[in-house]
Image (cartoon, rainbow, N blue to C red):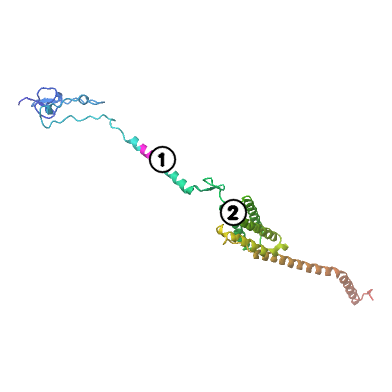
Amino acid sequence: MTNSPYCGNCGGPAAGTRFCERCGAESRTIGVRGGPMPVAETPTMVTGPPAWQAQAPPNFGAAHGMQGATPPPTYVAPGAQRSKRPWIVAGIVGGAGLLGAVGVLIGLVVIQPGGNQVNGGQSTQGQQLSFSQKVPTIVHPIIEDNGKITFALAGLTATSDVGPIKALFASAQSDTQTAQSEVSSAHPAGVDATLSGQVSAALTAEAAWLQVASNVVADPSNADSSQLPILTSEAETKLQALGSAVGGAAQAPFPPANPITEYAAAVKANAAAVAANTQFVNQVSALLDQSASSFKSVNDFFQQLNAVVNGGSASFT
């Protein structure tokens, strides 16, 4: 067997140089054909690029025109490739911030469309509201109070507990006074001045009706109950006339006078019946009191007759 030197990496003939002229491997991989197999060196931990990577040897095979020479693999140290995680985290944070900004912008647009949100009688642009724009806010509490009173009066009878109805009247009177104060302090001009007069007249009629109605409910014998139908018609007509300025005012229910007047009449009738019964009882009692002495005389006479019948004597003549 011929012992000729050869490269232990590619099997090509070795020229006795440090690197194989065919593949560029180091001389430590060179062996001898037919000889013993080369013993592998004990691997060592490499913490950096190997010496052949730090100072790359020349490609001798390519330099001598040999085809197929393969350069040694490129060494990439651990951690040399930059991690993409910071960029991913930064992208997530940035996207969340962008979504938050868009949400705030949408909220501002929805909550304050056109920048005209009302706040304390003024728009967000600082423009003072006109009187006609304030009127619905002034009148709507009155309309709501009238609706509550209408519902409460529907079940009113002579034996009803009128405490809740009295409370509704008191609340409505307070709201009416507040509305009157707002109108009187507005001092509008032009077309709004005309509207102010109409609102003031409607509130005055409402206040008059509430006063009489509450008085009659509290005291059905009050003579003002006869005024309720007229006051009701006047207040209802003036409030409905505000329909062009106050939405729903023209169709809003107004408390009718009939339940109150009928309640007053029924209570007075019951009171009259009780008075009549009391008078009759008193008269019967008076008659009994007047006949007490006569009853005693008749009783004494009967006893004397009974004594005579039984053989006794009597003192009457």
Identify residue for label 1. Answer: 97
Question: Residue 86 location in percent, x, y?
Answer: 34, 35
| Residue 68, percent from left and from top | 12, 32
Identified by mark 2, the residue type is: Gly
The picture quadrant where one finds residue 83 is top left
Binning the other alpha carbons within 10 Å of mark 1 as few (below 14), some (14 to 19) or many (20 upward) gives few
Q: Assign a secondary structure to mark 2.
A: loop
| Residue positioned 71% across, 62% down in the render | 224
Crowding at mark 2 (Cα within 10 Å: few <14, some 14-19, many 20+) = few
Quadrant in the picture for residue 16 = top left
Q: Is residue 13 left or right of residue 274?
A: left
Residue in the foreground of this view, choosing between 277 and 238: 238
User: Which numbered mark, 1 or 2, is in the foreground of this view?
Assistant: 2
Labelled disc at residue 20: none
How far apart marks 1 and 2 lie (CA) works out to 52 Å
Q: Residue furthest left?
A: 1
**Mark 1 vs 2: CB contact within 8 A:** no
Q: Secondary structure at mark 1?
A: helix
Quadrant in the rendering for residue 231: bottom right
The percent position of residue 88, horizontal first and vertical second, equals 34, 38
Vertical order, 138 against 272 (above or below) = above
Relative to residue 285, is residue 145 depicted above or below? Answer: above
**Residue 167: image x %, image y %?**
65, 55
Q: Main secondary structure of the magenta part?
A: helix
Query: Relative to residue 9, is residue 261 drawn left or right?
Result: right
The stretch in magenta equals 89-101
- Picture disc at residue 190: 2
Q: In this image, 278 relative to 206: left or right? A: right
- Looking at the image, which residue is at 48% across and 48% down? 114
Point out the tag, 1 or 2, that comes first from the N-terminus.
1
Query: Quadrant of the image for the N terminus?
Result: top left
What amino acid does circle 1 point to?
Gly
